[in-house]
Image: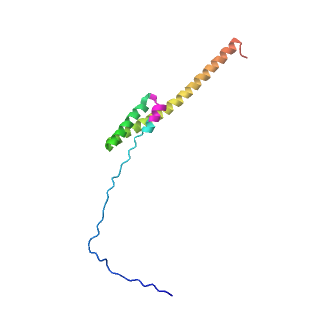
Amino acid sequence: MMQNKVDVRGAPLSTAPATTTVINVPVETVVPDHVVWSLFNTIFLNWFCLGFVAFVYSVKARDRKMVGDLTGAQSFASTARCLNIWALVLGLLLTIISIVLLGMAYAAAYGALLQAMQESGRYH
């Protein structure tokens, strides 16, 4: 059977204090600029031009972020977000109302056409 022998050593030979290096990594605050959402609202749901105005504020937020003005970027991004919400809600609401009204108008026109054709005797 083999036995291993371990030497016990004392304190390290150097008495110099240990030095440490601290690296401060700046925490980058993420400011969403909502450019893609604004572009979507500009192209598809641009009732009352709110999507275009939101797009302008989104670009301003992106410019402020590139310059390093995070407070200005957050302000413009907040405005763009609010305008995008209103553009989306109004766009969806007005689109649904338009589709319903258009369907009702087609149904009324079709009914009037059928009635006119029955009265003239062309349709039985």
Task: Describe residue 67's horizontal placement relative to residue 124 as left or right.
Answer: left
Question: Vertical placement of 96 versus 6: above or below?
Answer: above
The image shows residue 45 at horizontal and vertical percentages of: 48, 32
Left of 84 or right of it: where is 65? left
Q: In the rendered structure, does residue 45 fall within the stretch colored magenta?
A: yes
Camera-side residue of 109 and 64: 64
Number of numbered markers: 0
Check the picture and name the quadrant holding the C terminus.
top right
Q: Position of residue 6 (x, y in %)?
A: 41, 83
Residue 56: give x, y in percent of width and height.
38, 33
Seen at 55% across and 25% down, the residue is: 101
Quarter where residue 120 is shown: top right
Magenta residues span 39-47
Magenta: predominant secondary structure element? helix
Is residue 123 shown above or below 16?
above
Residue at figure coordinates x 47%, y 31% from the top left? 43
**Which residue, as the protein is rendered here, is positioned at the far top?**
120
- Is 66 in the magenta? no
- The percent position of residue 89, horizontal first and vertical second, equals 47, 35
Q: Residue most toward the left?
A: 16
Q: In the rendered image, which quarter is residue 13 located in?
A: bottom left
